[in-house]
Image: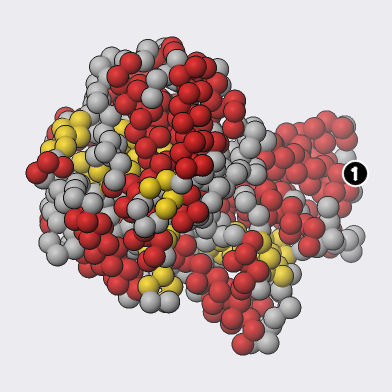
């Protein structure tokens, strides 16, 4: 029943041979289409937070069935890494429910959510997903670490070093990732939070950067890095190299799953099912300690469209009810920092995550396209999550608030307000928000309390 | 079988992405005397266009788009000898060589663009993912493409888009192709900086811009 990493590698060579097109269409698409029908799973725009627990159970069973039927496809060998039901269930049983991370006064506990019991949210903050210059990285990272409610850091990547662009697969991935870790460690020391756990090595897409930083001088064991599951339910040797390097060194793997809504899995129902399957498979293939949910709309990328919010809600509830594992979820917005819209998007996503068992990770402002993010985005995420926890917000009320917030921005995705770069919304020297940006945030807090009954 | 029921069956086969049904229906339509070119222009193309439009509205998904495009390809292949016998040719908006650039393995965006281009009548050469600039340029020349489409999901693969533009210049092929770039990190400013056309924020926008560049739409 136990499948170790070497056995996973063995199965990349011995599994059944399938053409990639057939895996995408005949296995993924057709199976999911049948499962959506069989389990009666249906997207509901008026109920973005699912109030019917049976729907979450159905989604879990559909995801488990998909994981068993499809397996994980290895792109490099065109073979499917298959697992039987007992192996998958054992993977779920063996998954961590609790991690003690960081050290000293910055040590925190990251817990799996159990349905019906709201846990204290674990706030994972930074300008996630954003490619930054060295100057932007060094300046903006402080603004996130300064936020007292932030438990862990995850601050994007460097895309240029010494004037040389960082190309995928080039030696610059080594240089950039090492430099990224130097800046992370420097900033944590400077802000007096040396023991804060972090996810890093984001400046490298290939395994090069991960390998280059797996040394205590750069990334200390006990921290985190991402291993993406490729769309949908695929892996390759680069990703498996990342997995093995971190697993043997002592860094936690986060299985990063960005199911595409409108892609091979179909609509939001399919995106939820394929994410559940990817989480289950990732526990074995990626040796994942944490699973990250980011159902991405094929046009808008962010996690704020209603279809994405609904899919993530279902994934969270499915695991919280059936087999709790540690889940986090991306808070990615179309709008940028310094705008009212980013606050609405952050609130809608965060309320959903906190209520449904995914700890918030973000904020990926402007989907990481522009360097328009700041620590106040993370403050909003943290204060919303804590307000939900402190008030023990019922699912029904959460659903009403989320629907009201989504109405405020869902017509703006084609032309979002991208806001301003970090140095325009913060005083760079002190790493504090400009008065006008703080005022927008204070107005938003009043609105949340007066119009939605959520006191931040 | 009447002409109108053949029309309905062909239309439905494309919508359903059913390559077996489409061949049967097309064969029967030919036997019923429907001209192959009008079958393409009046039945097959509008049906595939409908699939593309439904995808853009979120009513259909990528695999359905691919299956419909595959059914269309089978139908056109079946009709080819009939077209040649009548010395007729299919009019297309243009030929596009599409690639996800070197270092980038994220090809869903490119696959959506390819499927939507086919739904809009383009002839598409899909070069796949992680494709070096030299291969893109050589294949585009060989294919006699009108347009080169470059897709990049990562900021760290944008330099490979620039490589393609540089190589086109070095080979004296600047202006030979219209080059469009798209994907998550691509901005209009970056496209302008490297001398390419911005494909827009998503696949639908990219295809609209390529149609416009070819004098359609």
Q: Residues within 10 Å of mark 1 (few under 14, many from 20)?
A: few
Determine whether, in the image, residue A322 is placed left or right of residue B129: left
Q: Which residue corresponds to the image point at 15% horizontal and 48% vertical from the top-left?
A: A195
In this rendering, is residue B80 above or below A92?
A: below
Which of the 4 image quadrants contains residue A70? top left
Q: Where is residue B140 drawn, in percent x and y?
A: 64, 73
A153 relative position to A103: left or right: right
| Residue A218 higher or lower than A386, as above or below | below
- What is the chain letter for disc 1? B
Instruction: Identify which residue is drawn at 36% across, 51% down.
Output: A431
Residue bearing the label numbered 1: B33
Specify whether A359 is left or right of A366. left
Q: The N terminus of chain A appears in which quarter of the rendering?
A: top left
Q: Is residue A146 visible?
A: yes
**Residue B61, placed above or below residue B154:** above
Q: Nearer the viewer, residue B86 or B51?
A: B51
**Which residue: 46% across, 46% down?**
A434
Q: Nearer the viewer, residue B120 or A421?
A: A421
Query: In the drawing, does residue B61 fall left or right of residue A400?
Result: right
Q: Is residue A86 visible?
A: no
């Amino acid at each position: 029943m136990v499948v170790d990493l070497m056995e996973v590698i063995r199965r990349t060579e011995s599994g059944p041979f399938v053409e990639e097109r057939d895996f995408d269409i005949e296995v993924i698409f057709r199976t999911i289409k049948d499962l959506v029908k069989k389990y009666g799973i249906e997207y509901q725009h008026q109920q973005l937070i699912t109030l019917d627990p049976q729907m979450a159970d159905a989604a879990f069973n559909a995801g488990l069935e998909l994981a068993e039927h499809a397996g994980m496809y290895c792109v490099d060998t065109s073979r499917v890494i298959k697992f039987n039901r007992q192996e998958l269930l054992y993977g779920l049983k063996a998954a961590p429910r609790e991690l003690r991370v960081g050290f000293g006064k910055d040590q925190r506990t990251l817990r799996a959510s159990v349905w019906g019991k709201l846990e204290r949210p674990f706030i994972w903050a930074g300008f996630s997903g954003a490619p930054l210059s060295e100057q932007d990285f060094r300046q903006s990272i402080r603004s996130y670490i300064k936020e007292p409610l932030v438990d862990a850091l995850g601050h994007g990547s460097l895309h240029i070093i010494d004037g040389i662009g960082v190309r995928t697969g080039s030696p610059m991935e080594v240089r950039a990732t090492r430099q990224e870790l130097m800046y992370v460690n420097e900033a944590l020391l400077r802000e007096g939070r040396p023991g804060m756990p972090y996810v890093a090595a984001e400046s490298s897409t290939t395994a090069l950067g991960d390998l280059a930083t797996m040394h205590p001088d750069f990334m200390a064991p006990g921290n985190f890095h991402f291993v993406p599951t490729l769309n949908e339910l695929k892996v390759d040797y680069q990703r498996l190299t990342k997995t093995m390097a971190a697993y043997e060194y002592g860094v936690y793997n986060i299985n990063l799953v960005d199911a595409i809504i409108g892609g091979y899995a179909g609509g939001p129902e399919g995106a939820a099912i394929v994410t559940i399957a990817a989480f289950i498979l990732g526990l074995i293939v990626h040796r994942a300690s944490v699973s990250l949910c980011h159902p991405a709309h094929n046009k808008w990328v962010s996690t704020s469209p209603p279809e994405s919010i609904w899919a993530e809600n279902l994934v969270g509830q499915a695991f919280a009810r059936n087999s709790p594992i540690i889940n986090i979820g991306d808070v990615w917005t179309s709008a940028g920092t310094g705008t009212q819209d980013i606050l609405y998007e952050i609130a809608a996503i965060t309320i959903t995550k906190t209520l449904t068992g995914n700890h918030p990770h973000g904020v990926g402002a402007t989907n990481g396209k522009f360097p328009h993010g700041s620590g106040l985005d993370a403050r909003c995420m943290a204060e919303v999550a804590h307000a939900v926890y402190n008030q023990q917000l019922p699912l029904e009320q959460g659903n009403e608030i989320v629907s009201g917030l989504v109405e405020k921005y869902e017509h703006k995705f084609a032309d979002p307000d991208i806001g301003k770069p970090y140095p325009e919304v913060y005083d760079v020297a002190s790493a504090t928000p400009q008065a006008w940006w703080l005022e927008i945030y204070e107005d938003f807090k009043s609105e949340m309390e007066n119009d939605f009954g959520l006191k931040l | 079988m009447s002409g109108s029921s053949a029309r309905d069956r062909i239309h439905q086969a494309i919508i359903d992405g059913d390559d077996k049904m489409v061949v049967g229906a097309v064969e029967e339509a030919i036997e019923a005397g429907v001209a192959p070119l009008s079958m393409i222009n009046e039945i097959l193309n509008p049906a595939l266009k409908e699939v593309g439009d439904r995808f853009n509205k979120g009513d259909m998904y990528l695999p359905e788009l691919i299956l419909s495009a595959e059914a269309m390809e089978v139908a056109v292949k079946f009709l080819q000898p009939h077209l040649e016998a009548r010395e007729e040719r299919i009019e297309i908006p243009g030929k596009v060589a599409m690639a996800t650039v070197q270092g980038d393995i994220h090809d869903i965006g490119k696959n959506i663009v390819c499927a939507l281009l086919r739904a809009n009548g383009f002839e598409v050469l899909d070069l796949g993912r992680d494709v070096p600039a030299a291969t893109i340029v050589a294949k585009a020349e060989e294919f006699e493409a009108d347009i080169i489409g470059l897709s990049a999901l990562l900021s760290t693969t944008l330099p490979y888009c620039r490589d393609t533009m540089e190589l086109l210049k070095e080979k004296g092929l600047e202006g030979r192709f219209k080059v469009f770039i798209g994907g998550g990190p691509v901005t209009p400013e970056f496209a302008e900086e490297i001398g390419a056309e911005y494909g827009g924020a998503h696949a639908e926008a990219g295809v609209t811009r390529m149609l416009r560049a070819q004098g359609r739409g």
